[in-house]
Image (cartoon, grey):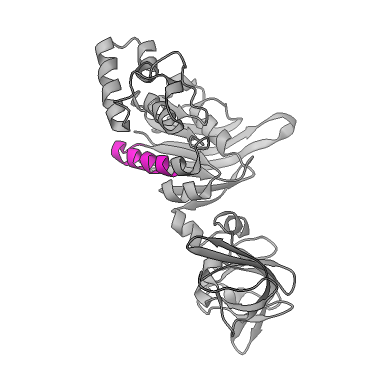
Amino acid sequence: MADVTLQKVTKNFSAGVAAVKELTLSVAHGEFVVLLGPSGCGKTTTLRLIAGLEQPDAGEVLIDGKLVNHLPPQKRDLALVFQSYALYPHMTVAQNMGFNLKMRRLPSYEISRRVRETSVLLGLDALLDRYPNQLSGGQRQRVALGRAIIRNPVAFLLDEPLSNLDAQLRAETRIELLNLQRRLAGTFIFVTHDQTEAMMLADVLVVMRNGKIEQIGPPEEIYRKPANTFVARFLGSPMMNTLEGRIVKDNGGAFFHNETFMLQLPKTLRNIDAIDSDTKIVLGFRPEDAEISPRGSITMKVELVETLGSQKFILGFARQGQQLMVSIDPKIKPQVGEVISISVPPESIHLFYSSSGLRIDR
């Protein structure tokens, strides 16, 4: 398996639209890297640039330190798995998996050996004589993966390969894919807009927006310390609550203040002393970090109570009209229209500059 590096890569499309803007990314050997972001953020274009399906207008693409900008896809020795399974309907599972090897003119005995080994790895050994229309969606996806694995590529590029599966099968296939990557010790670059998928699969998570990388790191670290308000709101379901206000300093302490409440800020914030009083900021907190409390500083009017099995959420609005969502104990039964108070532990508060959206204590 190989390292994959992009150095200040830019890709422009018609009308001067930049799909990728000076993007720099290093993927180490054996890492499972997930590109996450909304539609149009450039994640699929980035994958296609690595694969050679698109040519960069600037910058360098390197595989194991070798510049590959001008190499065609077939010379890069990468395996691609797309949203569409693209299986040949007139071929059996074995024939589909071995087709690329046949095109390379490998001996039939070598093709048979690799097909058998790969089918056992993917649990397809009992299905080798079946045709694609005789398979489930999950089985077809495994055949598509098998067709990629059998080539022994230097890296795997996967573009939303699970999006055609139903929820249960998608969850099962995610586990299979993660176990497969660990067994192969392979370099995987995976594109998705599904944050649950990203959080579960990634060793390294790359959050993208407008052709640029907003934040790179372990999924848990990004979730707990988002670099800016975009990452904070995008990563997490339900998304992070955000309230606009300003810094107020009094008697050596710092407070978040808006039209309806004042909340003391944790003293552990590294940059708080350098921020001027009255600076506009955004306060954020995760729904699971808040709780209903009669002593809570934030009040909200309940508009909706949503029960999801073991989880219950209340959706409402703070007095200044900003929408909030809070996770609560399923045993609690707030009523629609009720005004409640919520509290947030100081260590669970996130602060961002209103002007730039950047995290204050980064």
- Residue drawn 59% across the image and 87% down it: 252
- Residue drawn 49% across the image and 20% down it: 72
Pick the residue in front: 186 or 14.
186
Q: How many marks?
A: 0
Pick the residue in front: 168 or 195.
168
Left or right side of 51 for 302 = right
Rendered location of residue 185, percent (x, y) = 31, 39
Furthest residue toward bottom:
251
Rendered location of residue 186, percent (x, y) = 34, 36
- Magenta segment includes 178: yes
20 versus 198 height, above or below = above
144 versus 185 height, above or below = above
Rendered location of residue 261, percent (x, y) = 68, 80
Left or right side of 317 for 289 = left
- Magenta segment includes 306: no
Quarter of the rendering containing residue 303? bottom right
Pick the residue in front: 225 or 336.
336
Left or right side of 71 for 333 = right
Q: Which residues are magenta?
A: 171-186
Rendered location of residue 189, percent (x, y) = 45, 38
321 versus 133 height, above or below = below
Left or right side of 237 for 5 = left
By secondary structure, the bulk of the magenta-drawn segment is best described as helix
Examine the rendering and report whether any part of residue 195 can be seen. Answer: yes
- Residue drawn 41% across the image and 14% down it: 91
Quadrant containing the N terminus is top left
- Residue drawn 45% across the image and 44% down it: 168
Examine the rendering and report whether any part of residue 63 can be seen. Answer: no
